[in-house]
Image: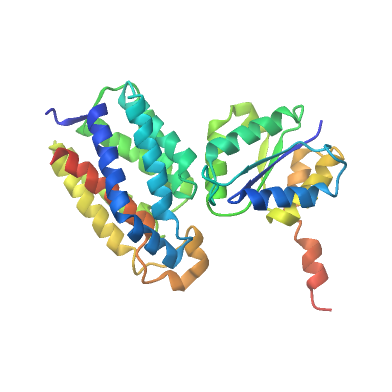
Amino acid sequence: MTVGIVVVSHSRALADAAVALAAEMVPAGSVPVRVAAGAPDMSFGTDATEIAAAIQAADGASDGAGVVVLLDLGSAILSTQLALDLVPGDVRDRTIVSPAPLVEGLVVAMINASIGTPRERVAADASGALQPKQSQLAAD
Amino acid sequence: MADAWDVPLLTQWLTGFRDAVDQAGEELTALDSAIGDADHGSNMQRGLAAAVSAVTDAPPADCGAFFKTVGMSLVSNVGGASGPLYGTLFLRMGTVAGTAETLAIQLFGECLQAGLDGLVQRGKAQAGDKTMVDAMLPAVRAYDEVAADGGPMVSALTAAAQAAAQGRDGTTPMEAKKGRASYLGERSVGHQDPGATSMTLLFETAAKVFA
C-alpha cells in the first residue's frame, strides 16, 4: 500500500517539472502520482473534473492507502474542494488536501509515500516542509 | 408567457449572459488585471461558450438538468476561481430545481438562495470581502422582498439586478479579503471587483428575459 499523490497546478509545465524534481528522490515508479493542471486550452487554470479524475486514479493505484493532494494557489484550492464533491464518498474520506508549499511539500510527500508512510503522516510532514529551509536561512 | 422559468427561457438567459460577458470581456479582464491575474473576462467567455454549446447541442429535460449542465461546463472550462464558484452556484441551483419543468417566483428564489449558500460555502467569503458575494447577496435579498409580495418575476429580477449593481459599485472602496486580490491588501482599494461585475451581468440579463 502506497499513498497516491495528486499535484494540482495552474500550469501543466510547472506541475510536470515539480513532479520530475521530486521523483529524483524516490525509486522510479514507487509512488502513484497524477497531475491535474492547466486549463483545457493549455492556458493557466484548473479544472475540477480533471482533478476529480486524478484523485480517483491515484486512489485506485494506492491499494486503499488513499491520496494526498498538493496544490499551488487560488483556483487550485477551490477547484480541488469542488472535485472532492464530485468523487465517491469513500474516495473523499481517503483524500487529504495539503496546505504545504508545492515544491517543498511534494518532495517530502513523495519520500514519505515511497517508504509506505500512512497518508495522515505524509500530509503532516508535507505541511512542515518549509522548516528545513527556514532553519537554514535563519540568522545565526 | 407564464410568469415562470422553463428550459427555453433559461437558455435565453444563459445566451444573454454569454453575450453580455462577451461585450464586457475586455472590461472584466482590465478590472482583473488591476487586482488579479487578468483572466476573468477570457475565462468566463470560454466557460460560457462551452455552457451555451452544451445546453443547445442536447437540450436538458428539466430545469435541474439545465443548471447542472451549465455548472459542470463552467467547472471544466473556466480555469480560474470563477469556474468552481459559478459552477457551485449553478450546481446548487440544479439540486433545488430538481426535475421541475418550470420555476415560478417562489421556487426560483429558493434556487437562488441555494446558489448563494453554495457560493459562500465554496469561497468562504463574507459580505464586504470584495467578491461576487457583494453583488449576489443584496440581489437575492431584493428578489425575495418582491417575491414575498407575489411578484411578478420581472419586478423581482429587476430589483435584484439593481441591488446587484449597487453591491458591485460598493466593492470599489473595499479592501479585498479573498482570492489573489487579497495579496494586494490595501492596494486593492479603489478598484471595482471583477467577480461582482460579472455577477451583476448575470442578474441584469435575467431581468431582460422577462422584460
Quarter of the picture containing the N terminus of chain B is: top left
Q: In the image, is A14 to the left or to the right of B209?
A: right
Q: Is residue A27 visible?
A: yes
Q: Residue at x 66, y 53 (%)?
A: A14
Q: Is residue B6 visible?
A: no
Q: Residue at x 72, y 52 (%)?
A: A18
The percent coordinates of residue B134 (x first, y second) are 34, 55
Above/below status of A124 relative to B32: above
Above/below status of B173 relative to A71: below
Quarter of the picture containing the C terminus of chain B is: top left
Q: In the image, is B157 to the left or to the right of B185?
A: left
* The image quarter in which residue A83 lies: top right
The percent coordinates of residue A51 (x first, y second) are 59, 38
Q: Nearer the viewer, residue A7 or B190?
A: A7
* The image quarter in which residue A48 lies: top right
Q: Residue at x 30, y 59 (%)?
A: B168
Count of numbered circles on the image: 0
Q: How is the image coloured?
A: rainbow
Residue extending farthest front: A41
Q: In the image, is B128 to the left or to the right of B7?
A: right
Q: Residue at x 53, y 41 (%)?
A: A47
Above/below status of A91 relative to B25: above
Q: Nearer the viewer, residue B130 or B74?
A: B74
The percent coordinates of residue A103 (x first, y second) are 72, 55
Q: In the image, is A91 to the left or to the right of B37?
A: right
The percent coordinates of residue B166 (x first, y second) are 24, 59
